[in-house]
Image: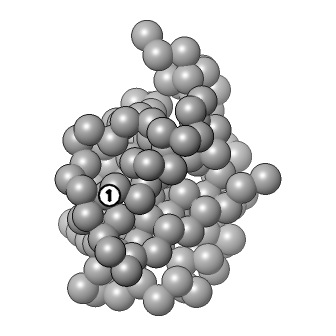
Amino acid sequence: MNPNKALWEKGDFTRIATTMRESGEALISQLGIGKDMNVLDLGCGDGTTAIPAAKQGARVVGVDIASNLVEAGKQRARQEKLSNITFQEGDACDLKEVESSSFDRLVSIFGAMFAPRPFDVAKEMVRVTKPGGKIIMGNC
């Protein structure tokens, strides 16, 4: 098993994520996300920024390495009755399931920064973002 995946599946990040809901909504409201946009939330957790982006009308894909967080995101999207959002497992270092040049916005808030190979992550982020699209990261 991927050691990074094992690490993120050990704890219950959703407990921490509940404290970040308002800041996720505030951030998304500043990014000019609209109905005709495709948004990728990389390292999405349980949807702290993916769900507010979907509420703005964008078509959203949330990718996280931890299956438990992907499932938590799916559950939150069902509770919110959002049909314009999907969550899937994936590794930020190799987004093989994601088509090139397919997103208007790529958001990664305290997500991709934890991946073990930052250069590979940066290449993948640029690869999947459309020309003229924007990559937004929040790191500590």
Vertical side of 137 occupied by 70: above or below: above
Please name the residue that numbered disc 1 is placed on. Answer: 128
Vertical side of 64 occupied by 34: above or below: below
Where residue 125 sits: x, y (%)?
43, 55
Left or right relative to 117: residue 39: left
Q: Residues within 10 Å of mark 1 (few under 14, many from 20)?
A: many
Q: Check the image and tell me how it is coloured.
A: one colour
Residue drawn at x 41%, y 59% is: 126
Residue nearest the viewer, comparing 132 with 2: 132
Where residue 65 sits: x, y (%)?
45, 33
Vertical side of 112 occupied by 57: above or below: below
Is residue 28 in view? yes
Where residue 38 sits: x, y (%)?
29, 72
Residue drawn at x 64%, y 38% is: 114
Is residue 77 in view? no
Left or right relative to 114: residue 135: left
Residue nearest the viewer, comparing 122 with 5: 122
Left or right relative to 101: residue 42: right
Residue nearest the viewer, comparing 62 with 102: 102
Q: Amino acid at mark 1?
A: Val
Residue nearest the viewer, comparing 137 with 60: 137
Residue drawn at x 21%, y 53% is: 99
The residue most toward the top is 1
Image quadrant in which you'd find residue 60: bottom left
Residue drawn at x 35%, y 65% is: 129
Where residue 138 sits: x, y (%)?
67, 61
Assign the N terminus to one quadrant of the image: top left
**Secondary element type, mark 1:** helix
In this rendering, the count of numbered labels is 1
